[in-house]
Amino acid sequence: MVRRNGVTVPLPGHLADQREWLNEVADMGYSDIWSAETDGADAFTPLALAAAWEPRLRLGTAIVPAYTRTAPLIAQSVAALADAAPGRFAIGIGSSSNVIVEKWNGVPFVEPYKRVRDVVRFLHDAFTFEKVAKSYDTFKVDGFRLSIRPRVKPTILVAALREGMLKLGAREADGVIINWLSPEDVKKVVGVVRDAAGGAEREVVARIFVCPSENAEVVRAGARFAIAAYMNVPVYAEFHRWMGRGPLMQGMWDAWQAGDRKAALAAIPDEVVDDLVVHGSPKQCRERIDQYFANGVTTSSVSILPLDPELDFRKALKELSPSAS
């Protein structure tokens, strides 16, 4: 696949003020923008604005949770964006986490693999534009028909950590979205995808956390907060055990479970921080990002972390861009 260089949106500031930013992103050589959905903007609104404002950018969600909307509602939003940006939209679907789904949204976080699989299967069914009357394992749809018909069916991607979801994305979707891993980790992940795809071409989108700053002490201190917040979520903890980081992260997990947040942060080794967060000079960061691609990533979603108070986000965006290489 052709290398695609993306960036995570929304960018800093109000959504209404980002048209110029998005034009600049395309001018810098970025090909894609990828929206996330946690506790800020929803995944679709920033992309809807970009669909109208900047036709050079491909648009993707990384990710939409499979639980927090019904499957037909997901299909409607996907169809609307695919219709607004023909051939330029990719829907990334994932389980999200028990924190977001259950604690924040009050939806039981049960059978995540089956839920994601069922939403993916339903999307394929919905985009036949035939009436769907079917019982999936985790929900039932009785008589829904998608009435908006985009000219191009959107790309469907599965957010994946371990083997089950990776194989699902390879077998039943157009690829996978991966997150919170090192360039070396990519080899193991991509190996699973390639084996499951049986030789078919699959997209591998990686969200890559980057802070182009040479103030390593400050960056590492800030990164530890982000790492602790994610890596104590069960799905991420199990992912990093699978990746072989269990011994390095056990001290952090133990302190977190004991309620000692300060000790948990202190227990995260520099090695783990440097594996999961790209930092250093802009040139060093670009070279590190290149390693992700060399090991099998096809599309990046660079997420710039303002861990250094001196960081100029707009400058960082330019220094990390394809035009800076």
Image (cartoon, rainbow, N blue to C red):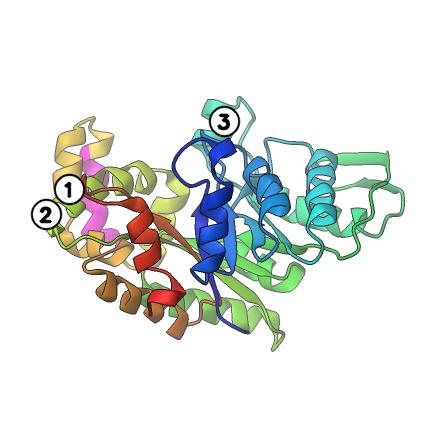
Q: Secondary structure at mark 2?
A: helix
- Residue 217 is labelled as 2
The answer to whether 162 appears left or right of 213 in the picture is right
Which residue is at 48% across, 41% downward?
36
Q: Which residue is mark 3?
A: 102
Q: Is residue 105 above or below residue 134?
A: above
Tell me the quarter of the picture where residue 116 sits: top right
Q: Which residue is mark 1?
A: 221
Dot 1 amino acid type:
Ala
- For the residues marked 1 and 2, what is the alpha-carbon distance in whole angstroms? 6 Å
Which residue is at 56% across, 41% downward?
64
- Residue 207 is labelled as none
Residue 127 position in % (x across, y down): 79, 50
- Region rendered in magenta: 245-255
Tell me the quarter of the picture where residue 173 sits: bottom right
Outermost residue toward the front? 20
Q: Which of the two discs, 2 and 3, labels the residue nearer the N terminus?
A: 3
